Every structure is written in structure tokens, then in C-alpha cells.
């Protein structure tokens, strides 16, 4: 699995930064790490300390960045429409999930695996559009 492409979701980085929860998993990960531009944006938006911003800048400098396509944006709206039709989620929840759908769609473009600790949202999305998923 050394040649698999990996995209870490925002939740994994946040959990790691706050608690160092995934230190051993990060050290033993095998694969080609790629950043999602969506994840980088979320991390920068939420950074409250210089160390957090510095961490994101290290990610930007050291790993290629993958970005959702125009098709992914449209597809994300369609997927969220389906989810809302079936589940009746709040507008706030749908807005929050849009980024997760974009991360999943981008990963699908490259055959990448999304690694997340946000099990419920990503498993829900996977039920509507298949992609490679690993839960930490």
C-alpha cells in the first residue's frame, strides 16, 4: 500500500494538533500524501495559534495540493440534495458537509483514500457516492 494516495481530512489534523492522538499512526503511514485545498482552507480558517498556521504552511510547502474541479462542485450540490431529501438535515449541517463532500469527490478523482476521524459524515457521504475511506 506504499503507492496509495492519501488525503487527510481536517478532523484528523485537528485531533492530532490538539491531542497528538495520531502520532504513531502518522509515523507508520504508508502512501503518497496529498493535501486537499479544502482541508488547507479549513485549517487556516480555524487556526488560532501561530503554531497551527505554521503547521499548515509546512503542509503547503511539502505536499502536492489537489483541488476540487467544477464538476466536483456541481456534484457536491447534487449529493447534498439527495442526502437532504432522504435525511432532512438543517441548512447549517448541509453547509458544513459541503466541504466533506468536496474532499471525498477530489479523492475519488485521483483514486485516493480519505483518512478521517469524522466517521458519521464521511460514511453518510460514501452511501451516496463511493470513494476510498479509512476511519481513524
Image (cartoon, rainbow, N blue to C red):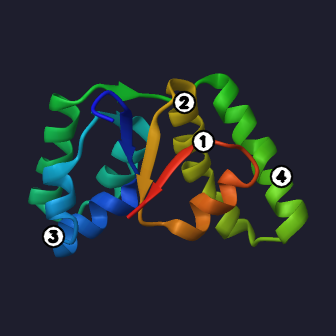
Front: mark 3 or 4: 3
- Which of pointers 3 and 2 indicates the residue nearer the eye? 3
Tag 2 residue? 68
In the picture as drawn, the residue positioned furthest to the right comes out as 85
Mark closest to the chain's N terminus, 4 or 2: 2
Above or below for 66 versus 115 = above
Q: Earlier in the sequence, mark 1 or mark 2?
A: 2
Q: Position of residue 131 (x, y in %)?
A: 60, 41
User: Residue 48 or 114: which is nearer the viewer?
Assistant: 114
**What is the crowding at mark 3: few (fewer than 14 residues within 10 Å), some, or many (at least 20)?**
few
Estimate the spatial distance between the alpha carbons at disc 3 and disc 2, rounded to whole Å. Answer: 29 Å
Residues tagged 1 and 2 counted as in contact (Cβ below 8 A): no
Quadrant location of residue 48?
A: bottom left
Reading the image, the residue beneath label 1 is 131
The answer to whether residue 93 is left or right of residue 27 is right
Q: According to the image, label 3 marks what residue?
A: 20
Element under disc 4: helix
Which quadrant is home to the C terminus?
bottom left
The residue at 74%/35% (across/down) is 75
Q: Residues within 10 Å of mark 4 (few under 14, many from 20)?
A: some
Mark whose residue sits in front, 1 or 3: 1
Q: Which mark is residue 99?
A: none
Pick whichever of labels 1 and 3 is earlier in the sequence: 3
Labels 4 and 2 touching (C-beta < 8 A)? no
In 3D space, how far apart are the residues under numbered discs 4 and 1 (Cα atoms)?
18 Å
Give the SS element for disc 3.
loop
Whole-number angstrom distance, CA of label 1 to CA of label 2: 14 Å
Q: Which residue is mark 4?
A: 81
Amino acid at each position: 500500500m506504499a503507492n496509495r494516495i492519501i488525503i487527510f481530512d481536517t478532523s484528523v489534523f485537528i485531533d492530532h494538533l490538539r491531542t497528538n492522538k495520531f502520532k504513531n499512526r502518522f509515523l507508520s503511514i504508508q502512501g503518497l500524501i496529498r493535501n486537499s485545498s479544502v482541508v488547507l482552507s479549513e485549517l487556516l480558517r480555524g487556526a488560532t495559534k501561530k503554531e497551527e498556521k505554521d503547521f499548515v504552511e509546512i503542509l503547503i510547502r511539502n505536499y502536492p495540493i489537489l483541488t476540487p474541479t467544477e464538476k466536483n462542485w456541481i456534484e457536491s450540490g447534487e449529493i447534498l440534495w439527495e442526502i437532504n431529501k432522504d435525511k432532512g438535515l438543517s441548512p447549517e449541517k448541509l453547509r458544513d458537509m459541503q466541504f466533506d463532500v468536496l474532499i471525498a469527490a477530489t479523492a475519488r478523482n485521483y483514486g485516493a483514500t480519505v483518512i478521517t476521524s469524522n466517521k458519521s459524515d464521511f460514511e453518510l457521504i460514501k452511501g451516496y457516492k463511493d470513494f476510498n475511506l479509512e476511519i481513524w
